[in-house]
Image (spheres, rainbow, N blue to C red):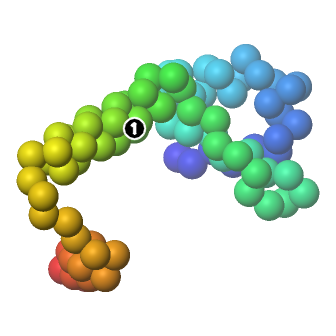
Amino acid sequence: MVQIRPVSDLRNKYSEIESIVTKTKSPVFLTKNGYGSMVVMSLQMYESLTNDLETRLDEADLQAKSTPERFSHDDVFSAARSRIRT
């Protein structure tokens, strides 16, 4: 279940929010004046999200070093759009 809480809960109910993000492995969405303000997640969840990204960026760097081939902005985004639509 998605947890949406006011940002003041971060100050007033920190231990409760910490428990939610660590035990359920789900983020907590915080609002300010009724609008989305930030997301709180466990360190493990953050690392799992960013580790994959870092790995893929490292792979892209290695690939770029191994070939002189380069792609234009239009080529990259056209390919991305076609993959999203499928």
Count the labels in the image: 1
* Image spot of residue 79 (x, y percent): 21, 77
The answer to which image quadrant residue 62 occupies is top left
Q: Is residue 49 visible?
A: yes
User: Residue visible at 56% across and 39% down?
Assistant: 27
- Identity, as a three-letter code, of the amino acid under mark 1: Leu
Dot 1 crowding, Cα within 10 Å, few <14, some 14–19, many 20+? few
Task: Say which of 17 and 73 sits in front.
Answer: 73
Question: Is 28 placed above or below 75 here?
Answer: above
Quarter that holds the C terminus:
bottom left
Q: Is residue 52 visible?
A: no
* Image spot of residue 61 (x, y percent): 24, 43
**73 left or right, relative to 46:** left
Q: Residue furthest left?
A: 67
User: Residue visible at 51% across and 23% down?
Assistant: 43
Task: Say which of 16 and 62 sits in front.
Answer: 62
* Image spot of residue 40 (x, y percent): 64, 35
Q: Which residue is mark 1?
A: 49
User: Residue visible at 34% across and 36% down?
Assistant: 54
